[in-house]
């Protein structure tokens, strides 16, 4: 049996514990075995096949593994409460200016104030919420 077949069998064999344990390191070794199979298929000697397997596997462990674990450890940014309202679009209910007014934001009526005091927004206009100060939305 050709050596590239053995490398493919090794790759499949390394894929089994990957599925059972969900350890991505097994995938990195399986990819290394796949690269060694490709080397064998292209006519590389046994020593070259082994060196390709080791080099590809170690390179993935050194460079890809830390990036993957850093991505897994980052919690997704979930905005709740007031933070979720910043950036939302609202509809003006009562004229909004630098002194105040009312908007409909996520189905609720909020007091609002224009971020720039010299600008007025008329009823029916859409505005964007840029900040929340207490129970007042600052809009543009």
Image (tube, helix red, strand yellow):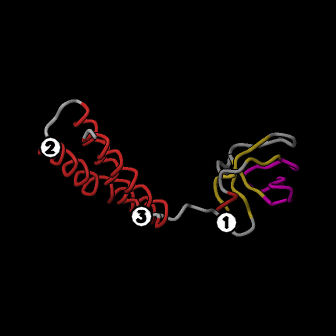
Count of labels in the image:
3
> At numbered mark 3, what does the secondary structure look like: helix, strand or loop?
loop
Q: Name the residue under label 2.
A: 46
Relative placement, left or right, of 133 versus 75 is right
Assess disc 3: are there few (<14), some (14-19) or many (≥20) residues with their C-alpha within 10 Å of its C-alpha: few
Query: Is 44 or 135 nearer to us in this picture?
Result: 44
Secondary structure under tag 2 reads helix
Disc on the earlier residue, 2 or 3: 3
Q: Is label 1 or label 2 in front?
A: 2
Residue 128's spot in the image, x, y percent?
Answer: 70, 47
Which residue is at the front of the view, 88 or 51? 51
Q: In this view, does 93 lie to the left or right of 84?
A: right
Q: Residues within 10 Å of mark 1 (few under 14, many from 20)?
A: few
Residue 80's disc number: 1
Identify residue for label 3: 23
The residue at 18%/31% (across/down) is: 43
Q: Give the range drawn in magenta.
A: 92-111
As rendered, which of 26 and 84 lies closer to the eye? 26
Residue 134 in view here: yes
Q: Which of marks 1 and 2 is nearer the N terminus?
A: 2
């Amino acid at each position: 049996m050709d050596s590239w077949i053995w490398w493919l069998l090794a790759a499949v064999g390394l894929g089994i514990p990957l599925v059972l344990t969900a350890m991505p390191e097994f995938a990195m070794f399986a990819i290394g075995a796949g690269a060694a199979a490709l080397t064998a298929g292209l006519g590389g000697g046994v020593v070259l096949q082994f060196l390709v397997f080791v080099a590809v596997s170690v390179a993935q462990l050194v460079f890809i593994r830390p990036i993957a674990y850093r991505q897994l450890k980052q919690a997704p940014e979930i905005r709740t409460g007031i933070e979720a309202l910043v950036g939302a679009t609202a509809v003006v209910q009562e004229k909004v200016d630098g002194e105040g007014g009312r908007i409909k934001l996520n189905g609720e009526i909020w007091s609002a104030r224009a971020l720039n005091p010299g600008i007025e927004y008329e009823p029916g206009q859409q505005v964007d919420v840029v900040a929340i100060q207490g129970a007042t939305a600052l809009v543009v």
